[in-house]
Amino acid sequence: MNKFASNLGTEKISKLLIKQAVPATIGILVMSLNMIVDTIFVGQWIGVLAIAAITVVLPIAFLISSIGMGIGIGGSSIISRALGANKFEKAFLTFGNQICLTVILAILFVTLGNVFGVPILNLFGAKGAILPIASDYFGVIIYGVPFLAFAMMGNPVIRAEGKPKFAMYAMMVPAVLNILLDVLFIKIFNWGMWGAGLATSLSFASCGLYILFFFFSSKSELKIIAKNFKLDFNIVREIVELGGVSVVRQGAISILMIVLNYSLFTYGGEISIAVFGIINRVMMFALSPVLGVSQGFLPVAGYNIGAEKNDRVKETIKKSIYFGSIIGTIIFIGIVLFKEQIIWIFTNDATLLNKTPNAMLIVFLVTPIVTMQLIGSAYFQAAGKAFPALFLTLLKQGIFLIPLAYFLPMYYGVNGVWWSFPIADTLSTLITIWVLKREVDKNLQ
């Protein structure tokens, strides 16, 4: 661990960000590609309603697994700062507490998901002809969610150890497996949505098992030690405070999906939900490099905050925003130039080909500035400041996008849903800039 500590505290910031962000970006890209291929396969081999069913179900699975992600991000913030301050025992204890919390909570929520499956699907927008298809998918995928939760807990911890390549491999393994199993189960065995769900569930399991293998291997310096499973109140409280930001973010996204699916179904029917299903997959893939920059930012900033190297923290903030904004601009230009061609990848349905391109262009309108939102929230998580991190996290999805997506369609129909995205992005970015500048001026001088 000393070498890891030395690198994060002394190596050139731009080089560190590249070393952390590139593997994170590749991992997220491959995982996003996995979701895109899933959508392409079900859209081409099962039908348009299958795209709508996946759009409804996946936010539920990710809401449950976000518990693991929250525990992972909250714990990795503690681990990074502990390593920066040479408190290695605290890092080990935090890791053990993370595992214990993830296992307990993931099993609890999966049980609830099984018992209340149909009401949950209805709540998230599985109405009309979408419900039976969504039920087939949800009934299988729910069993892979505990593995996904463990994987999402372990991934940021691996990055906090300074092993970003292994974190990348952990995200690539399930993506490749899911694509192969989709072909086998949907195309060859003709198992429909149940087969698509089984492929996804098994891919989640492969990801969780890979990360478990990593922590038992000689590559990991954070070992799984039974005595560290005993929950420590102070560490659990800090994990919950910081990780709760990610859980609340995913919770806000889930509530947003309920509102979006309601508005889309009310003002545009099943076809509008399918349109958003395609846009959402493109968004996941296209924004992967920007998300990779924010993921790479966390361990670098967290370590240097723990080591009280304020100049390096400020430089990390500036360079992360700079790199992310350039990437966001390139992404937007690509959407403008190739929006029709992108839609053709997913479907040959004439209605979707007509309705999706302009809607997607509106949703991506202010992509060049979204990095500022992500880095602002990530900074406060890295610094262990839960409240401002939570506030900035909720700005887009919770405070702005949910009400906009509900009220704008009352006046502008389905177009109101699409315009709610750039409006929410612009407002939340402006506030994030103000809050982050205040923090830097006050505490990083």
Image (cartoon, rainbow, N blue to C red):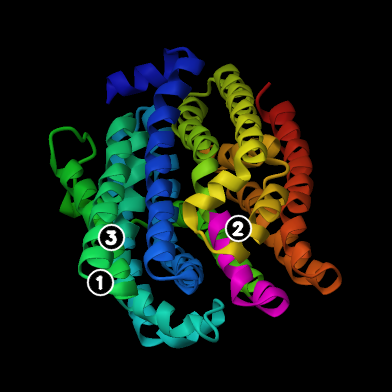
> Label 3 belongs to which residue?
182
33 relative to 400 in the view: left or right: left
Q: What element carries label 2?
A: helix
The magenta span reads: 262-280
292 relative to 158 in the view: left or right: right
Q: How many labels, in total?
A: 3
**Residue 210 percent coordinates (x, y):** 20, 47
Q: Nearer the viewer, mark 2 or mark 3?
A: 2
Residue at 24% x, 56% y is: 229
Residue at 50% x, 31% y is: 297
Q: Distance between the residues labelled 2 and 3?
A: 24 Å
Label ID, residue 190 = 1
| Magenta-drawn stretch contains 268 | yes
Q: In which quarter of the image is residue 352?
A: bottom right
Bin the neighbour count of mark 3 within 10 Å (Cα to Cα): few under 14, some 14-19, many 20 and up. many
Q: Which amino acid does label 3 sit on?
A: Asp
Q: Distance between the residues labelled 3 and 1?
A: 10 Å
Cβ–Cβ under 8 Å for marks 2 and 1? no
Q: Is residue 227 visible?
A: yes
Q: Above or below — where is 293 with respect to 314?
A: below
Q: Can residue 252 be seen in this view?
A: no
> Label 2 belongs to which residue?
353
**Residue 35 percent coordinates (x, y):** 41, 54
Q: Quadrant of residue 57?
A: bottom left
Residue at 53% x, 36% y is: 294
Q: Which amino acid does label 1 sit on?
A: Asn
| Magenta-drawn stretch contains 248 | no
